[in-house]
Image: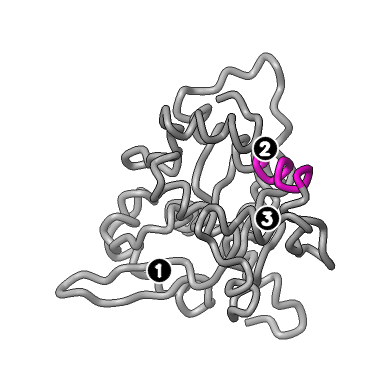
């Protein structure tokens, strides 16, 4: 660890293409085995093991053993925010003539950013929550509960007051790497995303972070946010 400029040590960890691929794969909030991550990175088992050890030692990942397998996950929400922000810096603004694959378009529309909602849908919902005074700008990169927020979230069986007293950051601006605008993260963002999944508004797509809006979800998004999906 470079104690004078510690950001350089983290940059070195993330900067390797194989390790970057592993970190991005883990943004789906699902624990992945060393074998899964080796395939994602296109690395041999031995090389993948070395990469994963560095990521764990650097504090970016945690691991657990289950039988003969070892599983990995991102260590803390700050790592997720950093990866999204770096994605926004590293990705050039989209141009009209650039042709995106269907898979890329799905990720841009709606995806999980670890435990909260991102993409066009995540940004649109966050903007509507501000307009409706459900959340409002707080200090720094935080959101605060708005004048209508406690009741609005209670209607979704989300106790905003309890989340405010939890150890985790209550509500954060997470810079969306495809939209270059903030979406809602933190404990509140995670609770809202969990509710949308549990209520059947959103459905996960197989082997991707992309999400599908269900028919019920389209109705709810139109009624609650005025969004036509």
Q: Mark 1 = which residue?
A: 52
Q: Nearer the viewer, residue 148 or 112?
A: 148
Residue at the limit of the structure toward the bottom, as seen here: 3
> Where are the magenta residues, as a range?
123-132
Label annotation for residue 124: 2
Q: Earlier in the sequence, mark 3 or mark 2?
A: 2
Q: Quadrant of residue 96?
A: top right
Numbered disc in front, either 3 or 1: 3
**Label 3: which secondary element:** strand
Look at the numbered discs 3 and 1 and tell me whether their residues touch, using CB distance below 8 Å. no
Residue linked to disc 3: 174
Q: How many marks?
A: 3
Where disc 2 sits, the SS reads helix
Element carrying mark 1 = helix
Left or right of residue 107: residue 125: right
Whether residue 129 appears in magenta in the rendering, the answer is yes
Is residue 45 among the parts visible in the rendering? yes
In the depicted view, which residue is nearer to us: 85 or 160? 160
Name which quarter of the figure residue 136 lies in: bottom right
Task: Name the residue furthest top.
Answer: 97
Query: Could you give the CA–CA distance between mark 3 and mark 1, rounded to whole angstroms?
Result: 25 Å
For residue 61, side relative to residue 49 (left or right): right
Q: Is residue 21 visible?
A: no
Which residue is at a point 47% across and 47% down the rendered structure image?
Answer: 196
Dot 2: few (<14), some (14–19), or many (≥20) neighbours within 10 Å?
A: some
User: Which quadrant, please, contains the C terminus?
Assistant: top right
Residue ID at (67%, 14%): 97
In front of the other: 156 or 32: 156
């Amino acid at each position: 660890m470079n104690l004078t400029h510690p950001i350089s040590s983290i940059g070195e960890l993330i900067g390797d293409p194989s390790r970057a691929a592993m970190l991005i794969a883990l943004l789906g909030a699902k624990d992945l085995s060393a074998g899964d991550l080796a395939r994602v990175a296109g690395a041999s088992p031995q090389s993948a093991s070395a990469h994963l050890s560095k990521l764990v030692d650097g504090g970016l990942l945690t691991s657990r053993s289950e039988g003969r397998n070892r599983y990995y996950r991102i260590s803390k929400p700050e790592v997720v925010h950093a990866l999204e922000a770096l994605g926004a810096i590293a990705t050039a603004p989209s141009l009209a003539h650039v042709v995106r694959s269907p898979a890329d378009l799905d990720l841009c529309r709606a995806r999980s950013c670890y435990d909260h909602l991102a993409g066009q849908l995540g940004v649109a919902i966050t903007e509507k929550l501000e307009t409706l005074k459900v959340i409002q700008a707080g200090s720094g990169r935080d959101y605060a509960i708005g004048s209508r927020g406690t009741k609005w979230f209670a209607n979704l069986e989300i106790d905003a007051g309890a989340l405010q007293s939890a150890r985790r950051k209550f509500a954060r601006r997470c810079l969306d790497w495809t939209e270059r605008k903030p979406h809602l993260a933190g404990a509140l963002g995670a609770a809202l995303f969990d509710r949308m999944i549990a209520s059947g508004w959103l459905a996960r797509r197989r082997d991707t972070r992309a999400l599908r809006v269900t028919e019920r979800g389209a109705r709810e998004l139109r009624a609650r946010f005025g969004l036509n999906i």
